[in-house]
Amino acid sequence: MAGGYMGTILRVDLTTGEVTQQSFSEETLRSYIGGSGLGARILYDETTPDTDPLGPDNRLIFLTGPLVGTRALNFGRYHVVTRSPLTGGFGEANSGGSFGPAIKRSGYDGFVFSGKAKEARLPLR
């Protein structure tokens, strides 16, 4: 896709176990630039001020921007967007390293998690 985006995110519903893809128009990607902008749009569209930040209706959104994974300096960052448990409002963080470029290499601009898993399936040692 043009403009540095893959044009698609992966959605994971932890309640049902369903994994789907969502594509965005180039107009949407240009209107909400970067992981922070697109994440804010998704959060606004899919939650309300009454959404419990620790509940299954909240979203946990990991997104990259258009320059992530390119040779541009300092563009290995990704954004995490959700409703803040502290304030109940918009919450955002970003980080660097290899995870942002790995998201892009996977063929997606990011991931959106929703719902609640029935049980944790972590290997405990």
Image: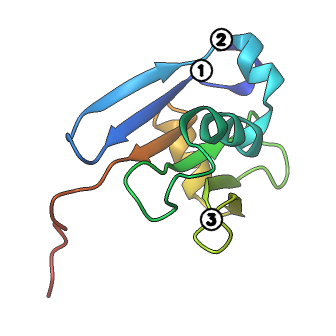
Amino acid, disc 3: Ser
Q: Quadrant of the C terminus?
A: bottom left
Give the residue number, with chain letter if any, for mark 1. 7
Query: x, y percentage for residue 57?
Result: 42, 48
Q: Nearer the viewer, mark 3 or mark 1?
A: 3
Residue furthest out toward the right? 73
Q: Which mark is residue 59?
A: none
The residue under the point 34% across, 27% down is 20
Q: Which residue is mark 2?
A: 25
Give the CA distance from mark 2 to mark 1: 7 Å
For label 1, the SS is loop
Label 2–label 1 contact, CB within 8 A: no
- The quadrant where residue 40 appears: top right
The three-letter amino acid code for the residue at tag 2 is: Ser
Q: Quadrant of the N terminus?
A: top right
Q: Is residue 34 above or below residue 6?
A: below
Within 10 Å of the Cα at label 1, are there few (<14), some (14-19), or many (20+) other Cα atoms? Answer: many
Q: Which badge, 2 or 1, is on the more N-terminal residue?
A: 1
Which residue is disc 3 drawn over? 84
